[in-house]
């Protein structure tokens, strides 16, 4: 019998209001994994009401920041205790390598430990005034109910990067995970409940983006939306939240440049290129999909990258030797193939890959693909593919590659490979991207803030700065002078 999963609302599993369910499929084997509730506006309303009630409850409102920090740390401990299960479930759900998930689970509790430690360190400040009798100070307070809409490529990491600071600041949350990866997010909600968070503080409504996701965005009781996903959807959310004057944090698409200068260690740079575009099958917003190689080392870098691409072990993501698993779902496979064909029609050449590999599984596999003879104005170079497809292009000068790298609608990340310290500083200051890696690629930490420039989003995730995304600032004035009130027609200060 197929496993059936319900929403998690108000500390309990809750069947969908209209009785509808959807099916999740293993992208490697195409076997049915489970059924999950198809959320509607009625389910979202129940979840938001539960979160609003929890936010107003005496239990949550009177809990000290230090106590919230203890709960977050206990939550992190429970993730460690259940790491093997969580890694296996997410690998089955989206096809990510089990060995990569094991590595992610080792670091995932750090989000909860870090923000648990920050919970009682959100402070205001005292502001100077022109009168010794007047005191002015600020304080930060929780927003209320926040809606978290998370994607399928790294469900647990991207959910906790939002949920941890939201809870640390004292908010309550309703999470709408991707319809392709609901299982681990529901499991996280169960662990939060086990950790001791009051009922209704963490809620999960599963279902389709156009149904449950849209209903969450439209709910008038929300104080904020945090979304990770496509730029098109992010723009629609930004418009909806702006119309209601509530905040939004949006981590959106990317078309990141990975730049290799001729003084770089080419072997290391080639591995950085491989990590940047073929790890996680290229299904990451920070993928280094535009590779720029200085002409003096272009041929050498291309040879090393294509040789390593050809040797990548493709297959069952649960097997320890596998280096590249499937794409997450059928439509994504079709999209990647269409973009490769488009690149060829635009004049590009496939140096390696470009099609389905020869594997013994029926899933959504695609070869690591290297395109050459491409130019920066081609659609295949400018538009986000979200798959294992790299366009490798030559350049001559630092000024030229800066212009090429910045000539994109996106600004999420960039990589630079050089042994010249002065050049690395110039590049990091002039590249239009929120994260710059020098002689490395695809690294992150809950302590290091991430912000997208241009069409890559608004707001900050990770780091102390992200705590402000989940609070509002209040300025408080106190007059301690018990004497007569001054001229009422003159502005006080």
Image (cartoon, rainbow, N blue to C red):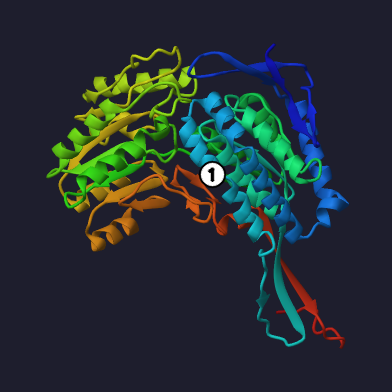
Depth check: 455 or 357 in front?
Answer: 357
**Label 1: element kind:** helix
- Give coordinates of residue 21: x percent, y percent: 70, 17
Q: In front: 116, or 485?
A: 116
264 up-or-down from 51: above or below: below
Q: Which residue lies furthest to the left in this view?
A: 296
Regarding residue 217, the answer to whether it shows in the image is no
- At x 37%, y 52%, the residue is 436
Q: Identify the image quadrant of the C terminus.
A: bottom right
- Rendered image quadrant of residue 390: top left
Residue 332 location, x and y as percent?
Answer: 45, 22
Mark 1 lies on residue = 106
Q: In this view, does 372 lie to the left or right of 470?
A: left
Judge left or right: residue 471 versus residue 485: left
Q: In which quarter of the image is the N terminus?
A: top right
Q: Where is residue 416 in the image (x, y as percent from the top left)?
A: 29, 50
Residue 291, how many percent across, how many down?
27, 39
Image quadrant assignment for residue 290: top left
Can residue 239 be seen from the camera position used here?
A: yes
Judge from the rendering whether residue 332 lies leftward or rightward of residue 431; answer left or right. right
Q: Residue at x 49, y 40 (%)?
A: 103
Q: In this view, does 473 lie above or below 446?
A: below
């Amino acid at each position: 019998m197929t496993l059936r999963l319900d929403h998690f609302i108000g500390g309990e599993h809750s069947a969908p209001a209209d009785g509808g369910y959807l099916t999740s499929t293993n992208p490697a084997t195409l076997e049915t994994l489970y059924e999950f509730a198809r959320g509607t506006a009625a389910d979202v309303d129940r979840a938001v009401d539960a979160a609003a009630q929890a936010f107003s409850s005496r239990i949550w409102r009177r809990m000290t920041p230090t106590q919230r920090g203890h709960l977050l740390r206990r939550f992190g401990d429970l993730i460690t205790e259940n790491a093997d299960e969580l890694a296996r479930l997410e690998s089955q759900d989206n096809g990510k390598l089990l060995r990569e998930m094991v590595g992610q689970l080792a670091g995932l509790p750090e989000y909860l430990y870090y923000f648990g430690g920050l919970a009682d360190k959100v402070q205001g400040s005292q502001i100077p005034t022109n009168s010794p009798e007047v005191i002015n100070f600020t304080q930060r307070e929780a927003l209320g109910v926040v809606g978290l809409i998370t994607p399928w490529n790294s469900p647990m990491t991207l959910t906790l990067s939002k949920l941890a600071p939201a809870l640390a600041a004292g908010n309550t949350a309703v999470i709408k995970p991707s319809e392709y990866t609901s299982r681990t997010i529901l499991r996280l909600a169960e662990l939060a409940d086990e950790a001791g968070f009051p009922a209704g503080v963490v809620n999960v409504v599963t279902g389709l983006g156009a149904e449950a996701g849209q209903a969450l965005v439209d709910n008038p009781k929300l104080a904020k939306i945090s979304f990770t996903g496509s730029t098109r959807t992010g723009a629609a959310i930004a418009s909806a939240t702006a119309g209601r004057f509530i905040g939004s944090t949006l981590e959106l698409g990317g078309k990141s440049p990975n730049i290799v200068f001729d003084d770089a260690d080419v072997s290391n740079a080639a591995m950085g290129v491989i990590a940047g575009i073929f790890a996680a099958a290229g299904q990451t917003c920070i993928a280094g999909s535009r590779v720029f190689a200085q002409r003096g080392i272009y041929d050498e870098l291309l040879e090393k990258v294509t040789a390593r691409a050809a040797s990548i072990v493709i297959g069952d993501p649960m097997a320890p030797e596998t280096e590249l698993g499937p794409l997450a779902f059928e439509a994504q496979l079709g999209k990647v193939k269409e973009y490769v064909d488009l690149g060829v029609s635009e004049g590009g050449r496939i140096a390696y890959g470009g099609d389905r590999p020869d594997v013994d599984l029926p899933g959504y596999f695609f070869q690591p693909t290297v395109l050459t003879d491409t130019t920066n104005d081609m659609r295949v170079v400018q538009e986000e593919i979200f798959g294992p497809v790299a366009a490798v292009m030559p350049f001559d000068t630092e000024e030229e590659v800066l212009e090429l790298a910045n000539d994109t609608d996106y600004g999420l990340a960039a990589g630079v490979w050089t042994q010249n310290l002065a050049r690395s500083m110039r590049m990091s200051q002039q590249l239009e991207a929120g994260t710059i890696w020098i002689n490395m690629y695809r690294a992150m930490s809950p302590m290091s803030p991430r912000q997208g420039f241009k069409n890559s989003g608004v707001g900050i995730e990770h780091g102390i700065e992200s705590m402000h995304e989940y609070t509002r600032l209040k300025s408080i004035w106190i007059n301690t002078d018990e004497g007569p009130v001054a001229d009422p027609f003159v502005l006080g200060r």
